[in-house]
Image (cartoon, helix red, strand yellow):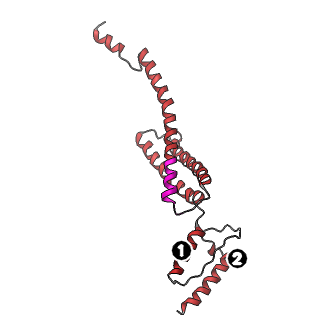
Amino acid sequence: MTTTENSVRRAPGPATGTGRGRWIMLAVLLAVVTFPAAIIAYVVATMVTFVGNRHWAFKHRKGKGLRHETMLFVALNCVGIVIQVGIVDLAYYELGYKSGLAYNLATIIGIGLATLFRLYAYRRFVFNNHQVEEAAELASALRRQAVPLTTLFWTGTGDRLNHEYQFNFNLPQARTAFQRTLAFLTATAGR
């Protein structure tokens, strides 16, 4: 046996006995280390995102308290993670796209869909108790500027109205809003 053959035979790698053990140990170690690292990354990202959303992006929206906002935020963020990872898994396992380009495209699409879901969900469910307060603040500011206006708030009635309730004339609130709008236009049109 020559020196070259001997050095090739002893070179560590997956084909040799000692190399195979090292590769298996490395694979197990990476699998054990990357999973907690991914969990830690998601937890840190969720905390940073919550603070940013609560104190910057949605600071003008009053929620139902820190505990309520935190629990909903974490739950909806987990749904966003499932959407994001689910798109990648769908592309990889179900559709069979296993190239690096396909993985990156699936990741970008997953991040995009998860981001849209999160934006909608955070606005709708986490930081949502705001419409009446904001409208009252606007009405007060307009009155201070002597702008003619009339207000119509459906508070304390227990009715859950959607954003464009006034276009559904099957609702008595929509008919009232329409009548009040006509009365306001009639009163201010002659000014």
Q: Quarter of the image for the N terminus: give it.
A: top left
Residue 158 position by quadrant? bottom right
The residue drawn where x is 54% and y is 93% is 190
Q: Position of residue 26 (x, y in %)?
A: 45, 25
Q: Which amino acid lies under the numbered mark 2 shown in the image of this protein?
A: Pro
Q: Nearer the viewer, residue 77 or 144?
A: 144
Crowding at dot 1, Cα within 10 Å, few <14 / some 14-19 / many 20+, comes out as few
Crowding at dot 2, Cα within 10 Å, few <14 / some 14-19 / many 20+, comes out as few
Q: List the residue tagged with mark 1.
A: 138
Q: Position of residue 164 (x, y in %)?
A: 60, 71
Mark 2 or mark 1, which is nearer the start of the sequence?
Answer: 1
Q: List the residue tagged with mark 2.
A: 172
Q: In this picture, which residue range is highlighted in magenta?
A: 47-60
Q: Position of residue 135 (x, y in %)?
A: 57, 72
Q: Secondary structure at mark 1?
A: helix
Asked if the stretch drawn in magenta spans residue 18, the answer is no
Q: Secondary structure at mark 2?
A: helix
Q: Viewed as shown, does residue 104 lie left or right of 5?
A: right
Relative to residue 181, is residue 128 depicted above or below?
A: above
